[in-house]
Amino acid sequence: MDIVLEVCDYYLFDRLYAAALPKGGKVDQFIQNSPVFQQVSSKISQFLPSSSCSGCSDTVDNALFGNTTASSTFSNALNFQFNATSVNVANLPSYLWSKVMSLQNKSEIYGLKPTFLPAGDYFSSSILARSNLLRESLTILVITTIFGWLLYLIVAYLSYVFVFDRRIFNHPRYLKNQMWLEIERAMTAIPVMVALTNPFFLLELKGFSRLYFDINECTGGWKFVFLQIPMFILFTDCLIYCIHRWLHWPSVYKRLHKPHHKWIVCTPFASHAFHPVDGWAQSLPYHLYPLLFPLHKVLYLGLFTFVNFWTVMIHDGNYMSNDPVVNGTACHTVHHLYFNYNYGQFTTLWDRIGRSYRRPDDSFFIKETTAEKEKQEWKKQVTQMEEIRNELEGKVDDREYAEES
Ligand SMILES: [Zn+2]
Ligand SMILES: [Zn+2]
C-alpha cells in the first residue's frame, strides 16, 4: 500500500492537501489557537508515560495533524521501558501501549520521508502531512474504493464479453434484472468493505506489518519470494474456508451471507456482490497474512490483484477445467446451486478434509448439447437445489426469477 500511496501522494494528493489545508492557513491558525486542541493535547500528554514526554507538546499535532513528524510520538512511547514486574492497574494502559509499539518497525512508517520518488514541491506544504492518520485514512478510502470499483468493473466486463457463457440467461433460476442487481450490490458494498479494511491498511502504513521491499540474503532472496505465493494461497484458502463455513451457520447466513446466495446461477458481476461485512470477513485472511508473515510488497500488490481476478473467474460460468485440486468455476457454481458444498476459494483441499466437497456435475462440461437436453439438466438442478434451499432458507423464496415458474 505504501508504494501505491506514495505514487498517488506525489502526483496528486500532496498538491490537493496543500491547496485545501496549507500550513499557516486559516485552519492551521484556528487549530493552534483552539482551547479544545490545547486540552486534547494535554490529555494525551498525561496518557503517555511521563518519562517520555519531553516532546509531548507536539503529540496531538503529530498524531492528528502531522505538523512535525508522527515518528516522534511513536518513538517517545517506545523510549519508555517498563519492567513487567512493576505493571499494575494504574500503568496497564501505558504498559500495553509500549507492548504494541514494540511490534512496530519504525523504518517502515509511511510518509516521514520519500522512499520511491523524490519529495516534490508540495511534500510538506499541508498541515496534514503524509504520515498523518486522518489523511492516510481518507486517501486510502478514496484510492482503494476507486481501484476496487475499476478492477471489479473492468475484469467482470472483460469476463462477460470474452469468457462468460450467456446461455445461463435462460436458466430457470436466473433472476429478473439479475446482472444489474449484482452490479448495484457490488458497487454499494465496495466502499463499505474498503472502510472496514482501512485499519489493516493503516497498520501496514504505520510499520506493523512484515511487508518488505529489498530482496537480498537477509530477506531470503528470490527463492523465498516465490515460496510466498503457495504460502499465501494455502494460508488464505484455509482461513476463507473456515470463515465461509461460519457464514453458512443459519443465523449468520440469514444476516450476512444470504445476499451473495441470492444468485443461484451467476454472472461475472456476482463476484463482488456481497453484504459488505460478508465481503470484508472473507477478505480478512488477505490482510492478516502480511501482519503475520514476511511478504514482498510488489508481490502483495500482485496477489491482491490476482485474488480479485480469481473471484470474478469463479463466477463466470465457463467451466474450463474439472481439476480435482483446483476450486474452479465449476466448484463454485456447485456452491451457488447447492449451498452446502465447496466453501473453498482456491483449492478443494479443505472441503475434502471438512467433508464438504462435491464433485461438479458431469453435465457442466458437455459443450455440445441440445436446448432440450440442457433444459432437462436445469430441471434436475432446480429440483435438487429447491430441497437444500428450503432447508437453509425456509419455504418462502423472496427471489424474483426472470422466467415465471
Ligand atoms: Zn456461501
Ligand atoms: Zn460466489
Image (cartoon, rainbow, N blue to C red):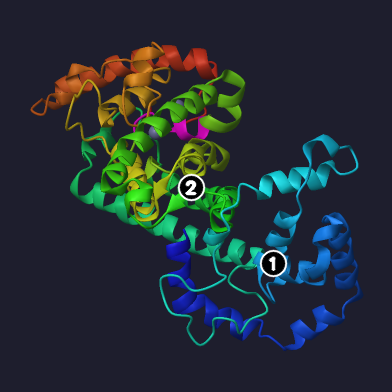
259 is within the stretch colored magenta: yes
Q: Main secondary structure of the magenta part?
A: helix
Residue visible at 72% across and 89% down in the picture: 24
Choose between 17 and 124: the one closer to the eye.
124
Classify 10 Å Cα crowding around label 2: few (below 14), some (14-19), many (20 and above): some
Q: Position of residue 214 (x, y in %)?
A: 37, 57
Q: Position of residue 19 (x, y in %)?
A: 60, 86
Residue visible at 34% across and 40% down in the picture: 228
Label placed on residue 210:
2
Identified by mark 2, the residue type is Arg
87 is within the stretch colored magenta: no
In this picture, which residue range is highlighted in magenta? 258-265
Earlier-in-chain disc, 1 versus 2: 1
> On the image, which quarter does residue 134 sit in?
bottom right
Choose between 301 and 151: the one closer to the eye.
301
Identified by mark 1, the residue type is Ser
Which structural element holds mark 2? loop
On screen, residue 1 versus residue 225, left or right, reads: right
How much space separates mark 1 and mark 2, taking CA atoms? 22 Å
* Residue 405 visible in the shown view: no
The quarter of the rendering in which ligand 1 is drawn is top left
Residue visible at 20% across and 44% down in the picture: 163
> As displayed, is residue 320 above or below residue 98?
above
Instruction: Mark 1 and ligand 2: say if the CB distance to the nearest ligand atom is below 8 Å.
Output: no
> On the image, which quarter does residue 235 sit in?
top left
For disc 1, the marked residue is 72
